[in-house]
Every structure is written in structure tokens, then in C-alpha cells.
């Protein structure tokens, strides 16, 4: 087993907008536990270096052990659903995030998942956007600046916004990156922003559409 040292500088805490994930992949599969709420959900908590690189897969001998976080599973099903196909209960996604990123975090499995859940609550993204009049709506375009400002107003730090492209070619809000200090205690200003997922100036914030092409339910 590895020594639990913090060989990284900060975390990206990444949340996704499920309706946009479904649009990007052309299809998605709702979790076996049911259609997710119309809310942001957790993608992961990713150790990172200030130069933009990151460590991953830090303990090849680790494996996900549900018994270590059984008290969190129902909360994770709600806040950290997997929308990949085929439909799943989330364990595969959580295992992927734990093995790739969590094993580099210096946290144990329970603390890793608990911390991510706590930061989702603290970030309160949907409410912060709502407070600025930014709501998921078809056909409406919001400026990236207004979205960043609304989140900064609530969280105290500027997020990075990643976009993807919907089936009609419009850019839409896909993921929100916030930064967390290496002891996983507080949001901080991001030392460096990620690359890619450029937005353009105006983007969509889509609701779940009734005619999304889901392979499975
Ligand atoms: P993508 O190429 O889709 O942006 O990212 C693929 C995967 O690489 C992500 O799910 C994540 O695991 C990892 N990744 C991408 N960008 C970053 C980054 O800036 N920092 C870290 N720590 N991981 C990243
Ligand atoms: P990353 O390596 O980018 O952190 O994680 C992405 C991996 O998790 C991919 O293999 C992707 O297929 C899988 N995955 C499962 N469910 C989801 C989901 O709901 N959202 C995203 N972004 N990836 C998911
Ligand atoms: P700047 O950071 O120089 O103001 O912006 C450079 C480009 O990045 C512009 O096209 C701007 O719209 C875009 N941009 C600014 N902030 C973000 C962000 O948080 N995410 C993404 N994807 N693009 C951004």
C-alpha cells in the first residue's frame, strides 16, 4: 500500500450537467436507480499539479470496497449518478473515479466520497444560478460571464466552465470546475484552469428533454 502523502497541489472538483452529458454522447442511459434529478451531479475530485499535469492510478492494488462507504451509497446514488450506457447503479463510475483519482488524494475511500458530497452541497450550483435568473430552459442563451459571475457570487471563487456541443451544434454548459486545497478543506482560487471545452460567449443550459434518445432505462 502507498504512503498517504499529498503529492499534488490542489484538487479540481468537477460537476456535470446531466442533460448536457446526454446530449453530447447522443445517447445516455439513466441509472438503474431512476432518472436523476434535474441538478448538477458529481463527476469527480481530481488531484492536480499547479503546472496543469496530474497524477493518476496511484495504487494499482486498490479496489473499491462498498463496505467502507455503505452509509454514503444512497446519497451517492442521488448526487453522483452515472449516465453512461449501459445503465448502472454507479459502482463502476465510482470505482473508476476512486482508482484513477481517489488513490492519489491521500484520502481513504470514505473520506474521498464524503468530501466530494460535501463540496457539492457547499457549491450549491443550481441555486446560485437560479439566484441570478439562470435556469435550465430550451432555446435560451446565457453569457458564460453571467454564469461564472453567478457561481462566484455564491462560492467566492471563479469556476472554469466547460462546454460541449448539442445535436444542433450549439455550445452548452457541460461541466463546472472549482478548485479545492490539497487538504480537501476549502474552495480556493484555481492555480491554473484546465484546457479545452471552449464555450464561445453565449451558451445553452438545457433541461432534460422528453425526447432524448436513451438506449436503456
Ligand atoms: P477529457 O479528455 O474527456 O477532458 O478527460 C478525460 C479524463 O481525463 C477525465 O475524466 C479525467 O479523469 C482526466 N482529466 C482530464 N483533464 C484533467 C485535468 O485537468 N486534471 C485531472 N486531474 N484530470 C483530468
Ligand atoms: P474520467 O476518466 O473522465 O474521470 O471519467 C470518465 C469515465 O467514467 C469514462 O470512462 C466514462 O465513460 C465513465 N462514466 C460513467 N458514467 C459517467 C457519467 O455520468 N459522466 C461522465 N463524465 N463519465 C461517466
Ligand atoms: P479570457 O480568459 O482571455 O477572458 O477568455 C479567453 C476565451 O476563453 C474566450 O473565448 C472566453 O469566452 C473563454 N472563456 C473564459 N472563461 C472561460 C471558462 O471558464 N471556460 C471556458 N471553456 N471558456 C472560457
Image (cartoon, rainbow, N blue to C red):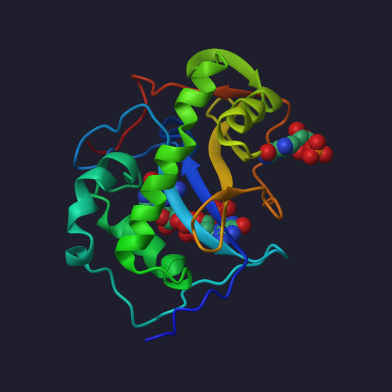
Residue 139 spot, x, y in % from top left: 55, 13
Left or right: residue 4 compared with residue 72: right
Query: What residue is at 59 percent from the left and 61 percent from the top?
Result: 10
Quarter of image, res 70: bottom left
Q: Is residue 29 visible?
A: no
Q: Position of residue 85 (x, y in %)?
A: 32, 47
In which image quadrant can residue 60 be found?
A: bottom left
| Near-viewer residue (45 or 20) | 45
Q: Residue at x 53, y 36 (%)?
A: 174
Visible in this render: residue 38?
yes
- For the N terminus, the image quarter is bottom left
Q: Residue at the location (44% across, 36% down)?
A: 26
The answer to whether 28 appears left or right of 78 in the picture is: right
Q: Nearer the viewer, residue 26 or 50?
A: 50
Above or below 116: residue 9: below
Is 166 on the left or on the right of 196, as rendered?
Answer: left
Amino acid at each position: 500500500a502507498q504512503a498517504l502523502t499529498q503529492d499534488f497541489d490542489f484538487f479540481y472538483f468537477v460537476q456535470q450537467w446531466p442533460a448536457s452529458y446526454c446530449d453530447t454522447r447522443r445517447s445516455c442511459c439513466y441509472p438503474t436507480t431512476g432518472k436523476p434529478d434535474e441538478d448538477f451531479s458529481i463527476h469527480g475530485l481530481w488531484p492536480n499539479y499547479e503546472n496543469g499535469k496530474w497524477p493518476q492510478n496511484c495504487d494499482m492494488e486498490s479496489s473499491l470496497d462498498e463496505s467502507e462507504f455503505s452509509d454514503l451509497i444512497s446519497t451517492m446514488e442521488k448526487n453522483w449518478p452515472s449516465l453512461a450506457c449501459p445503465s448502472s447503479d454507479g459502482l463502476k463510475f465510482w470505482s473508476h473515479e476512486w482508482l484513477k483519482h481517489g488513490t492519489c488524494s491521500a484520502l481513504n475511500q470514505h473520506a474521498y466520497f464524503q468530501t466530494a458530497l460535501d463540496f457539492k452541497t457547499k457549491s450549491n450550483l443550481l441555486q446560485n444560478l437560479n439566484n441570478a435568473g439562470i435556469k435550465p430552459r430550451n432555446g435560451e442563451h446565457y453569457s458564460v460571464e453571467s454564469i461564472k459571475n453567478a457561481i462566484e457570487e455564491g462560492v467566492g471563487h471563479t469556476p472554469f466552465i466547460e462546454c460541449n456541443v448539442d445535436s444542433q451544434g450549439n455550445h452548452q454548459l457541460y461541466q463546472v470546475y472549482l478548485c479545492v486545497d490539497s487538504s480537501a478543506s476549502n474552495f480556493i482560487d484555481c492555480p491554473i484552469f484546465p484546457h479545452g471545452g471552449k464555450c464561445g460567449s453565449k451558451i445553452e443550459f438545457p433541461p432534460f428533454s422528453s425526447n432524448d434518445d436513451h438506449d436503456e432505462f
